[in-house]
Image (spheres, rainbow, N blue to C red):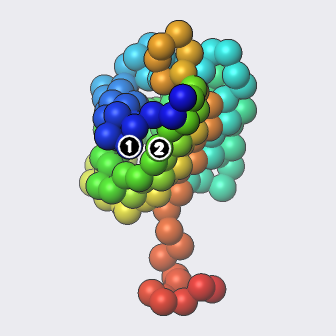
Amino acid sequence: MGTTEDQSSDEIGALLDRLARGYTERDLDALMECFSDEVEVTVYGTGADERRVGRDALIEQFHRDWNQSESATFSPVWVKGGARGDVMWCAADLTLAFRADGDEVSWSGRSSIVAVREGGTWRVVHWHISVPYGGQELGSSF
C-alpha cells in the first residue's frame, strides 16, 4: 500500500523537475500537465495577493509571472517528502531566480506540495511557495 522512501524520492524529484522545466521554459501546456484536472487546485505564491484557486486562476498567475519577467526559474536545493497510496507530499528549499526590468534577482524560497496520482501520473493539488521574512533574525521566532 505504501511507497518506499527511495521510490517516493524519485517520484518527488521527477514531479519537481517537470514543474521547474515547464515554468522555466514557459511551456504552459507542459506545466499544466503537472496539475490535477480532477481536483480543484490551490496555490499560494510569494506575493500578498497570490492565492489561486482552480486551473484558470493558476493559468492567469503563470501569465502574470511571465509577463512581468524576462526569465524566471526555481531550483530545489533540499527536498523531503513521502507518499502513501495515491497521495504524495514534499517540503523543499528552493533557489528562485528571475530577471525583471533588466535586473537579475535570486531569492531563497520554500515550497510545499501535495500531489495525487491520476491515471498513473502524479499531479499537484496544492502548492505553496514562500520567501522567509528577511527582517527576522536567525534564532528568533518573531
Q: CA distance from mark 2 to mark 1?
A: 6 Å
Rendering quarter of residue 20: top left
Nearest-to-viewer mark from 2 and 1: 1
Farthest residue to the top: give it. Answer: 119
Residue 101 visible to the viewer: no
The answer to the question of whether label 2 and label 1 lie on touching residues, with beta carbons closer than 8 A, is: yes
Q: Residues within 10 Å of mark 1 (few under 14, many from 20)?
A: some
- For the point 41% across and 52% down, which residue is it? 80
Residue where numbered disc 1 is placed: 5
- For the point 53% across and 10% down, which residue is it? 119
Name the quadrant of the C terminus. bottom right
Residue where numbered disc 2 is placed: 82
Q: Position of residue 123 (x, y in %)?
A: 52, 24
Q: Relative to the observer, which residue lies in front, 142 or 28? A: 142
Q: Amino acid at mark 2?
A: Gly
On the picture, is 6 further left or further right than 45?
A: left
Farthest residue to the front: give it. Answer: 1
- For the point 56% across and 15% down, which residue is it? 118
Residue 55 visible to the viewer: yes
Q: Position of residue 22 (x, y in %)?
A: 36, 25
Q: Relative to 37, is 104 above or below?
A: below
- For the point 53% across and 57% down, which residue is it? 130
Q: Amino acid at mark 1?
A: Glu
Q: Relative to the observer, which residue lies in front, 89 or 65? A: 89
Helix, strand or loop at mark 1: helix
Q: Position of residue 127 (x, y in %)?
A: 57, 41
